[in-house]
Amino acid sequence: MTRTPEARDAEKDDERTTASGALRRLVCFLASALDVRYAFVLALDHEGEGSPTRVDVWLAKDYGLRSEYAEPDIALYPPTPSTLDLVSVLRAAAPHEPERASIERKAVVSLPLVAASGRWLGHLGIVDPEGRRRLSAPEHLRPLARTAAAELSRWTGA
């Protein structure tokens, strides 16, 4: 049976919806488990082999009790693995929250997420303004990094 383009698009939309739900649950779990105010997954959507063309952010707030999804304007910062400013991305994801404007760079702990092909997919991280480094070391993020990378691959259609 041959599928129509509409059927393929519907399948892709289903995959993206499923991946988005999984990423939302993942960040809520992470914030709750590590007892931090914010946890996030940031996805970089590439078209072809060039630089990312879109940024998507799943953010758990209030220790995992609430979550949101945002598409901040990528023109505000040129995302490359060496120059991505996670603080600016998180601020741009919710400009209406003044509390996020006070996030400092030292409060953000993250791991880059990379596909099996070596393509940079995004970041998994937490914001720990209280500086409880005993809980927020990158090693605590590693167990969920593989899951986050797999869901980002589904999200971007990689």
Image (cartoon, rainbow, N blue to C red):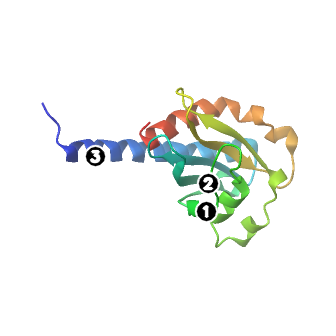
SS at badge 3:
helix
| Contact, mark 2 vs mark 1 (Cβ under 8 Å) | yes
Viewer-side label of 2, 3: 3
- Earlier sequence position, callout 3 versus callout 1: 3
Task: Tell me the tag on residue 93.
Answer: 1
Viewer-side label of 2, 1: 1
| Contact, mark 2 vs mark 3 (Cβ under 8 Å) | no
Query: Can you identify the residue that label 3 sits on?
Result: 9
**Amino acid found under the numbered disc labelled 2:** Leu
Residues at marks 2 and 1, CA–CA distance in whole angstroms: 9 Å
- Earlier sequence position, callout 2 versus callout 3: 3
Quarter assignment of residue 125: top right
Task: Tell me the tag on residue 59.
Answer: 2
Residue 70 percent across, percent down from the top left: 54, 60
Residues at marks 3 and 1, CA–CA distance in whole angstroms: 27 Å
Categorize mark 1 by other alpha carbons within 10 Å: few (<14), some (14-19), many (20+): many
